[in-house]
Each structure stands twice: as C-alpha cells, then as structure tokens.
Amino acid sequence: MNPMPIRLIILGSSAGLASAHRASSSYLLDCGDYGIMFDCGDGATRNFLSMGFRPEWVTHLFISHTHADHICGVSYFVQQRHLSRTDVPLAIHCAPEAVDFLTDVLQSGYLFLKRLSFDLVFDPVEPLTPWRDDHVTVTPYPTTHVDPMRAYAREHGWPDRGGCTAFHISAGNRSVLYSADLGSLDDLKSIPDRIDWLVIETSHVNLGDLWPWVDERNIQQVILTHIADDFDLRAADDAETRTSAKVLIANDGLTLDLN
C-alpha cells in the first residue's frame, strides 16, 4: 500500500534536436519526502528549480542512455547539489559501461567524487533486475535504440557506453512505463508488466502502429513526449478516433497524479 501521493512531473520534453521552447529529456517522480529523476538533459535543472524543488531532495537518478539530450545536464545537477552543501547521498543508476564515462564527465569539470559534499555512488543497471524502495519499484527493460551505434563503436575501436533502457515504474497500485528512446515499437511489446500510464517518445515511433497496441494492452493514458518543434500537435486530436486511451501532449511542467 502506498502511504503518500506520488506525482510524475515532466521536466524536459524536447527531442534530440534542441527546442526553443522545451528542455531536453528529464522526468521527475515526486515521492513526497524525496524525488527520483529519470534522465537529466539540458535545461532540466532550471525547470526543476523553477518548480520550487531543491537538488538535494533528489536521491536517485536513472539514466536511460548516454545521448547528450538525456545526460548533458547531469554534471550541472550534481554541481548544484554540491554547492548546496548537502550531505544527502545520490545514487546514479546507469548501464555498467557508462559508469567510467560519467565519472570522467564529472571529474573533467572538477566535480571530483571524493571532494563532493555528499556521497555519489553508481549503481549499474542490469536489464530485468528491479530496483525497489518502500514506495517504488523500477524495472529496466532494454531497447534497441543505440544498438547500431554500439556496433559502430566496437567496429572502430571506440568504447561501448552501454545500451538504452526503458523504465517500468510501479508506485502503489499504479504503473508507468517511460519508454526513453526506442529502436521501434517492438522494443516495448515484450514487456509483460501492466502499464496504466505510457510516457512514450515520438521521434522513433509510428503513431499509427502505436494506437492498436495501446488498446491491446488496455493502457489508460498516453503521454507523447520527446517532441521536436516541428511535431504535428494535432496527433492527440487524431488519437481520439484511434484509441480509447486518454492522450496528452507533454509540456515542460506537466504534472500527472499517479494516485
């Protein structure tokens, strides 16, 4: 039983091509006494602060993959936490192959882990292995979004920075799937868990294929995100005739009450 209200807040809803109106990918789970962040792109910290949150309130950061629009705000967020002089630990959950890279990114900006005001620990994400606390369960599911790029890196002697991960979030009697970036909709079709809310990117998914699958899975609400400035916002209107789910277009600051 979940003893407290839980909200999902869209901190950044833009696509890989930077937007003049939206921050890059970032999502915040408000668990009351603490927050859990999913990805931390450009502008996420600004939006986070504008909503009245304090950096030390976030105790866990899950990273779907290492594309810049999903991680370029990580070092800035860590810096804000350090400058607040908090001693509240932060855990970063990411692909095992990304740990050294993210450590180097932080320390190249003089955010030396041993000199931070708080303990920063990396907790490598293993596919299908849930992370749990008293209120939330987060289960990572691999997607194929970066598989071609991983193959290219290996072929040319570049480091493999890990795959891409979708996150299934269970909170109380509600469940959310954050798709992160996909190779195709097939990446999600093998996920067995119940999905009440689907937060899905629009850059790599055919919406015409999405709606039948949404109804097949009895998904109640769909939030379209990872939106480019040229995205046709009439997609939600068209969806009214294609699916029984309620469809929303994400905007920075959109707040979803999961209770």
Image (cartoon, rainbow, N blue to C red):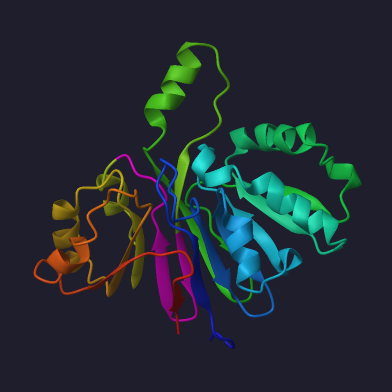
Left or right of 41 on screen, residue 52 = right
The spot of residue 101 in percent (x, y) is: 66, 32
Q: Is residue 174 inside the magenta stretch?
A: yes
**Considering depth in this image, is 126 or 185 the residue closer to the camera?**
185
Q: Residue furthest left?
A: 241
Tell me what residue is drawn at x 43 percent, y 18 percent. 152
Q: Is residue 126 visible?
A: no
The C terminus sits in image quarter: bottom left
**Considering depth in this image, is 119 or 75 the residue closer to the camera?**
75
How many dots with numbers?
Answer: 0
As drawn, 4 above or below 202: below
Q: Is residue 185 inside the magenta stretch?
A: no
Left or right of 162 on screen, residue 16 = left
Q: Is residue 234 visible?
A: yes
As drawn, 78 above or below 99: below
Tell me what residue is drawn at x 55 percent, y 69 percent. 29
Q: Residue furthest top?
A: 156
Q: Which residues are magenta?
A: 168-183
Based on the displayed image, in which of its 4 quarters is residue 240 positioned? Answer: bottom left
The spot of residue 190 in percent (x, y) is: 29, 52
The spot of residue 191 in percent (x, y) is: 34, 56
Left or right of 233 on screen, residue 25 = right
Tell me what residue is drawn at x 37 percent, y 64 percent. 250
The spot of residue 148 in percent (x, y) is: 37, 26
**Considering depth in this image, is 162 or 69 the residue closer to the camera?**
69
Based on the displayed image, in which of its 4 quarters is residue 99 positioned? Answer: top right
